[in-house]
Image: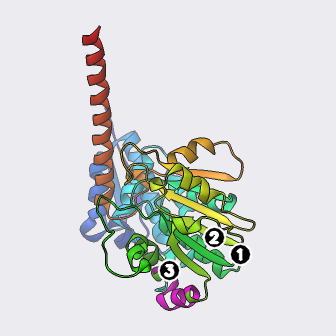
Amino acid sequence: MSKTEKNITIPADCIANVFGQFDCNVKKIEKAMNVTMIVRGDELKLIGEEGAVNRTIDIMDALVSLAKRGNPITEQNVNYTISLSLTEQTKEMEELDKDIICHTINGKPVRAKTVGQKKYLNSIDKNMIIFGIGPAGTGKTYLAMAKAITAFKNNEVNRIILTRPAIEAGEKLGFLPGDLQSKVDPYLRPLYDALYEIMGADSFIKNMDKGLIEVAPLAYMRGRTLDNAFIVLDEAQNTTPAQMKMFLTRIGFGSKAIITGDLSQKDIPKDAISGLDVALKVLKNVDDIGVCQMTSDDVVRHPLIQKIVEAYDRYEESQKSSKKTDKRTRNTKQK
């Protein structure tokens, strides 16, 4: 296949950010797109198959656009832009960081980093109940917390209620010392962490003492009606169908609920049915309920996390295929 050459100019004030230390970003893009990239000052020569060269130009344009808006170009940005180029969606990168949800206590802006996260945030804005489904590291809980805290600060709701089922992840914690609160705190620690980072410890403690922020196990929701509240149910894959129905029927007027979960990380017994699975089937056609499915492409933690998620997905698919093959073999032998 014939090769083509094209030159593009990178703005001088974006070069260090876009190219990366020792041109590490350029080398990563070269390898992924199978092109040769020659850097000469602010000029970048691209050599390769025409389609690959054009996609590489789209990648560089998207990264330059991010850099111009003051974003540090991370390895996650580069990897994600490369993956978008394969489906010709790099233009969507330009919309991601336009809307800032809030700032952390240290002044860091909180905003969408992937197309999946952007769709998730849009769904939160449009719907009363939102299901955020996806693997670890996609920002499901963190973005939900950011939205909850922002709504609380803007007086859109009177309180924040954060909950998750108290299910052990393969460990037995029932003999932990202390009172009931001490026993349930380990289950709720990820919610506390997000609150501290976005709201600050002092503000969180002050509002919690006033009863305006509540962090509690899911069992505490029974028998209540939650009006004018922003409610986040985390780790929903570990609920039973009865618990999920109980939670959904607690939601009152002026409230918004976000239910997050990872269907690949259930800690309930193998023969038990997940309340999240049932809810997604039962409520799929109900108005004012949004379902946002994120994938490994939306992982925004360390790039290694994305590789781990993808490796487990491949393994689980191979296990399913193997079981189907074994079942067909047994059926054939029986006949």
Q: Is residue 204 left or right of residue 229?
A: left
User: What is the secondary structure assignment of the residue under circle 2?
Assistant: strand
- Dot 3 alpha-carbon crowd within 10 angstroms: few under 14, some 14 to 19, many 20 or more: many
Give coordinates of residue 317: x percent, y percent: 32, 37
In the rendered image, which residue does mark 1 sit on? 156
User: What is the secondary structure assignment of the residue under circle 1?
Assistant: loop
Give coordinates of residue 60: x percent, y percent: 42, 58
Of the two numbered discs 1 and 3 on the same chain, state the one appearing first in sequence.
Answer: 1
- Dot 2 alpha-carbon crowd within 10 angstroms: few under 14, some 14 to 19, many 20 or more: many
Give the alpha-carbon distance from disc 1 to disc 2, as whole Å: 9 Å
> Which-is-in-front pick, marks 3 and 2?
2
Q: Is residue 204 left or right of residue 50?
A: right
Q: Residue at x 74, y 68 (%)?
A: 254
Of the two numbered discs 3 and 2 on the same chain, state the one appearing first in sequence.
Answer: 3
Q: Are marks 1 and 2 in contact (CB under 8 Å)?
A: yes
> Which amino acid, mark 2?
Phe
Give the alpha-carbon distance from disc 1 to disc 3, as whole Å: 18 Å
Q: Is residue 58 visible?
A: yes
Span of residues in magenta: 197-208
User: What is the secondary structure assignment of the residue under circle 3?
Assistant: helix
Q: Residue at x 55, y 69 (%)?
A: 220
In the rendered image, which residue does mark 3 sit on? 198
> Which amino acid, mark 3?
Ile
> Which-is-in-front pick, marks 1 and 2?
2
Quarter where residue 63 is shown? bottom left
> Which amino acid, mark 1?
Glu
In the rendered structure, find residue 3 and report the number of the disc placed on it. Answer: none
Does the magenta stretch mainly form a helix, a strand or a loop? helix
In the rendered image, which residue does mark 2 sit on? 230
Observer-nearest of 297 and 164:
164
